[in-house]
Amino acid sequence: MSRFLRHRLFWPAVILAALLLLNLVFTDHFFSVEIKDGHLYGSLVDIVRFGAPLILVALGMTLVIATGGIDLSVGSVVAISGALACLRISDLGDQNSTGGVLGAVVLALALSLVLGAWNGFLVAGIGIQPIIATLILMVAGRGLAQLVTDGQIITVNSSPYKLIGGGYWLTLPFGIIIVAAVLALTAFLTRRLALGLLIESVGGNAEASRLAGISARGVLMMVYAFCGLCAGVAGLMISSNVSSADGNNAGLWIELDAILAVVIGGTPLAGGRFSLSGTVLGALIIQTLTTTIYSIGVPPETTLLFKALVVTIVCLLQSPAFREKVFHGRGRPTSARPAAEEKATVTA
Amino acid sequence: MTSTTGPLAGRRTLPRKYIPVLVTAALFMAMFVAGGIRYDGFATGQIILNVFIDNAFLLVVAVGMTFVILTGGIDLSVGSVVALATMISAVLLQHGWPAYAVIALVLAIGAVLGLGMGAIIHYFEIQPFIVTLAGMFLARGLCYTIGTDSISIEDATFTAFAQSRIELGGGMWVSPSVLITAVVVLAAAYVLHYTRLGRNVYATGGSEQSALLMGLPVARTKIAVYTISGFCSALGGLLLSFYMLSGYGLHAVGMELDAIAAVVIGGTLLTGGTGYLLGTVLGVLVLGLIQTIISFEGTLSSWWTKIFIGLLLFAFILLQRLIGARRR
Amino acid sequence: GCGSSDGSGGSGGSGDGKITMGFAQVGAESGWRTANTKSVQESAKEAGVTLKFSDAQQKQENQIKAIRSYIQQKVDVIAFSPVVESGWDTVLKEAKNANIPVILTDRSVDSKDTSLYKTFLGSDFVEEGRKAGKWLVDEYKDGTDTVNVVELQGTTGSAPANDRKAGFQEVVSADPKFKIIASQSGDFTRAKGKEVMEAFLKSNPKIDVLFAHNDDMGLGAIEAIEGAGKVPGKDIKIVTIDAVHDGMQALADGKINYIVECSPLLGTQLMDLAKKVVKGEQVPARVVTEETAFTQEQAKQALPTRKY
Amino acid sequence: MAVPAPILRMNGIGKQFPGVKALDGVDFRLLPGEVHALMGENGAGKSTLIKVLTGVYDIDAGEIELEGRRVAFSSPLAAQQAGISTVYQEVNLCTNLSVAENIFIGREPRRLGRIQWTTMRRRAAEILARLDLYIDVSAPLASYSLAIQQMVAIARAVDVDAKVLILDEPTSSLDAGEVAQLFRVMRRLKDQGIAILFVSHFLDQIYEISDRMTVLRNGKLVGEYLTRELGQVDLIGKMIGRELADLESLEGRPLARQSAPLVEAADLGRAGSVRPFTLTIHEGEVVGLAGLLGSGRTEVARLLFGADHAGSGSVKIGGEPVSLRTPRAAVRRKLAFCSENRRAEGLIPDLTVRENLVLALQAARGWTRPIPRRRQDELADKYIAALNIRPADPDQLIRNLSGGNQQKVLLARWLIMEPRLLILDEPTRGIDVGAKAEIQRLVAELSDGGMAVLFISAELEEVLRLSHKVGVLRDRRLVAELDNDEGLTTDTLTETIASGARS
Ligand SMILES: Nc1ncnc2c1ncn2[C@@H]1O[C@H](COP(=O)(O)OP(=O)(O)OP(=O)(O)O)[C@@H](O)[C@H]1O
Ligand SMILES: Nc1ncnc2c1ncn2[C@@H]1O[C@H](COP(=O)(O)OP(=O)(O)OP(=O)(O)O)[C@@H](O)[C@H]1O
Ligand SMILES: [Mg+2]
Ligand SMILES: [Mg+2]
């Protein structure tokens, strides 16, 4: 039990639960999940469904942050990927042809991968600080997306494409299935295979890792490329959900939300240990927060105050130092290396 | 017996630590010259002064950010605090408050916000990113709560700040804001280089743990830098009010990124401990000059503008990196 | 206005009789805006005006910088769509001192000194909100039951969002049977519009009318409504603003009930005004763009000829 | 003899870390004008006691008195202000600042609040000169080797006006000359009535400098003794709780000259760091490197491993020319390099002992071929037992281990690689006597099994005991290569180092 209480994700989970309960007060049947037209339907489903792109982006971001980097360009990649796919599909003779849509999707994802690798190249190959390296693509990439869409919204009318972000499969929203698959893949690569160890090692101490024979370059390339790919998938999802590509606005500010999700999930921005489940939880908290704001009717002017409040509570509760100082008074052992000693003992 | 001075001493004669900043400065000049060759009416002193005039607020904000980044932290709240400062000024002036009282109050509010965030970051050991992000939401939220419309400032003092010109001779001029900014920059450079606070900032950024064990007042230093950053943001907000003569909740959206970018382009490491204020000044100038080049180019569509900014930034960083890096 | 004796206009190109115009656009934040930009660019080409264009990326300070640089470059006329109403006096004075006439497009500035600009060409956001409200009042003039309205606002704090909301409110609040039961920001985007609408649908069992500040949010909301198993345009009536092509299509398909037009195509009018202003001719202080509103029937007719 | 009143007294000190009781009812006192050695194995709790005393950690139990008054420092700053000056075990300086600043930061000479840089640099140079160190004090500390950093840390501590001076393993990478220099300074301070707490694993040094010692074992107090009354063997017995196996069993190493050359470096050099040198290492041979502080031993090792790019020269491994551009390439050729700077270049502090242990092996296998968990556990258990790593918990974060135990983990990281050439730069830094003997035996065993070793140590005895051949460096130049036969003693070696003569 106490082990459970001390788990790193205990407090974020509590916050999530509290937010959900808060909704119940304002919305009857908030927890009810029914099957409508053979689809799972309900507020909880919505949270996961709308949170899916954020989870994806945040998963990629987690790995980047674990290496001690950051990727600001994900929003632009989201926009580019959606724009390219929709452009290709709108050029198809038959927008409903599965093959054509598949081709467009593959093309968009390939481009996302390349864009991610480009970031990786700047960071690992040339040695530019990640925040600036990815800022370049953040700015230019938004321009590229607008170039692709010509600044307009490209609307498509394709049922196979619609499936990705707005469709259902075996009553489940397809987006959730994609997220589950990507999560499983990431977990497999990092936890079953040894990628996770190498990432954490590079993020923990890059020079020591180099001397231990790790090719930091390779790891970084891979991680940034993966992050690009995740953003690409998220971009497809977002654009498919509304059957249109909006180069101007798709993915705007998603990088901030993604980083926030990662940090709430307990991965330090300085790099090192990371937690995939924490990130998923973090993203769900953010999405639930958004939904809560809509459903309990916080006026748009105060939305941000509400967000500030919740984020503050989350991070205070999560901080061992805060809990100690407030709940136990002073006098418990504190450590020389702040904030890291106890909280990192259990890893997902 | 271990007198190994001889042949080694000569090896590190010229301060190699200044090389990145020098390279940045040289590249900036090169960019200016290139602009002068390409565009008519570009290669004038006033263009550089205009960059200062148009970016005075950003520079002040970036100065505060430099302190924070030097300790290895980050402050995402600056843009919102800037907006909040414009908003509070505008509203209070509208209610007939005297200008200088407003200025003092706004500066105090900024500093207190920074102080609060710094204290939370230090005492509760929470990552700066998340705390200042909450601060960003808070300040922006406060703006909207005050009002969603933009509010004009008609106060005489503010207008005077906004519209007076300080002639430098030869048809060149600067705004009072530039002078304020210059004072801020010089004061900050002095603090960083010649006071204990400044050196503690560098030490904390180099290694917080070591700084602690060396008996440095890490707590005070960390809280101080966020306070400074909050103060600078509020001052930046005032300068922005001078510049725009309006208060608006959507002012300075994303300015935190510009400020961080300016600091980092100036050669300061995001991990803390290395960098110079001069670098930050150059960083702001580079961003400003890119803007100027874009407007002189004048025919770029919206998206080509962005792509072009990206390309210029890329070229700049790449050259900076290739010329500046003679490490291992 | 132009051809001033101190030769300041010389290098700008007015010597060969060609007009140089500096146009400071807000940004490219929406399809509407891009269409606006295109219209200006194309009309400039047709009218033989040399256009210096800059994109401020939604930042007022960038717009001010751009205008400053136009002054520096000694263009013949400056046109811009202000990001916000306030805070233009300083730079406009500089333009005035440099003898460069200024035309405002799309929205006005709140400066007391109206001599700072020659004219203002654009739509009236408040009026658009009112038009939407009037349609609503009209539509329900027979009933007495409460009408539950939900509103999808534009980006919080942005001028169109503020004004459209105000205009709508003004008309609708006159009749107590209209109740705005939920109002959230959808950031003018389809994705957000859909997301917010889904939440509305879950937390409010009975929604009669949706008022969206632009077509895109309305289009997103339509998907949400369909997803909840309701029929947009019937179960929930929808009124939006803008009249972009996709919106008109939905209107013609019966999924939207009414669209208030807000036309981005003011390029031609702008060029005419610019020429007059540069020649020193008198122009009216306020030129309203030709705009209307569409019902479903009108949409079906208008759709085939619609450029945008 | 009348014992003066202790300046510092600690009673019943207890400190609990999650899962480890680091200190348990420890009493300790420090008299003015004495050098007091704190002794104990790796992980006995020495550093923890010091950190508890100086306010780095809160204490769980017990009390501290300074000059008869109860104190509880909330931070190292408070301890410093109360007159306790400390050099902590790992070099805790800011490598991004200049040497002068590292000595003076926090108490810079100022006028009207303005830091006097010139004065500061001048005084820093003077202070270092007193330790016989003549370096450019305006250069960033990072440009100097660990040993020099250690000297700077000492300089900082001894210059403070203090009543109590605490030195936690200050000599772990210093060689004889510097140690002598440090001892001179310590004696002077002691004569001024300053109380000095000294920690070291070099027993010779303890016996040379200390007046009294306190022995800890497993976080518990064993006892306090006058140095002259406790013999070495007894001391070791008290530290490890049993008799130590014969220390000198490695004497008389047979030369392995007839074996094939493994690594041949020809004119390998790098501008500004080492002059081109030629060195051949045979299979099964242990080559020692000797030289003064900053003579270039570490740089030779780094070049051989590809950690730095060589500017000139070539390397052959097994007769085949190779290009060692990265450590990765070197590891692929089955070279291994254990750096002297464990904190900056060795540890991944956030990872567990097990993960740190298998890191190099995993890197060599590539990320697609994870080491099965069972194999990891086997390896971890094996080396935890072999090197006596404590606590014996492979899932403990390595940052929570004591310095000596961290060092053992890093050594194990390379031992499991079964390399052909193992480069050890100060491998026994901070390791206690028992484990040191263990490691030396291991090295000898491995070399007998055919592995070549390049062994760098500030301790000449150790170099001599292990190596077949000793390379001597001076001013970044390999000046001599001496066979380790009967004629070679520490004295002849010191002489060669000093004179730079070629034999
Ligand atoms: N922050 C910490 N968290 C958990 N355990 C710790 C921590 N610091 C030290 N320990 C444990 O406390 C014990 C004492 O460590 P300490 O560093 O005091 O040993 P030491 O006597 O200095 O050893 P060495 O000679 O190797 O430096 C060790 O078992 C160590 O693992
Ligand atoms: N006396 C000195 N003067 C200037 N620089 C020095 C001096 N000593 C060392 N350095 C610097 O320290 C770095 C490390 O030197 P190196 O590691 O080769 O020395 P070493 O022989 O291993 O000695 P040790 O590790 O005992 O200090 C080099 O990069 C060199 O620049
Ligand atoms: Mg120790
Ligand atoms: Mg060395």
Image: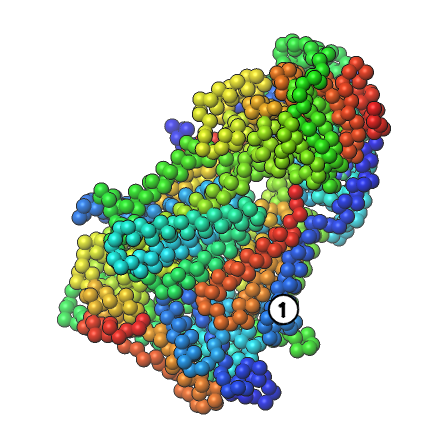
Q: Amino acid at mark 1?
A: Ile
Numbered disc 1: what chain? B
x and y percentages locating residue A331 in the rendered image: 54, 32
x and y percentages locating residue D38 in the rendered image: 68, 21
Please tell me which residue is depicted at 40% across the width and 76% down the height of the picture. C42
Q: Nearer the viewer, residue D194 or D147?
A: D147
* Quadrant in which ligand 2 is drawn: top right
Dot 1 surroundings within 10 Å: few (below 14), some, or many (20 or more)?
Answer: some
Q: Quadrant of residue D285?
A: top right
Q: Nearer the viewer, residue C30 or B117?
A: C30
Q: In the picture, which quadrant includes the C terminus of chain B?
A: top right
Position above or below: A181 against A5:
below
The answer to whether residue C287 shows anywhere in this view is yes
- Describe residue B131's horizontal placement relative to residue A233 as left or right: right
x and y percentages locating residue D450 in the rendered image: 62, 18
Q: Nearer the viewer, residue D477 or B207?
A: D477
x and y percentages locating residue B218 in the rendered image: 62, 43
Please tell me which residue is depicted at 27% across the width and 66% down the height of the picture. C247
| Count of numbered badges drawn on the protein | 1
Residue under numbered circle 1: B48
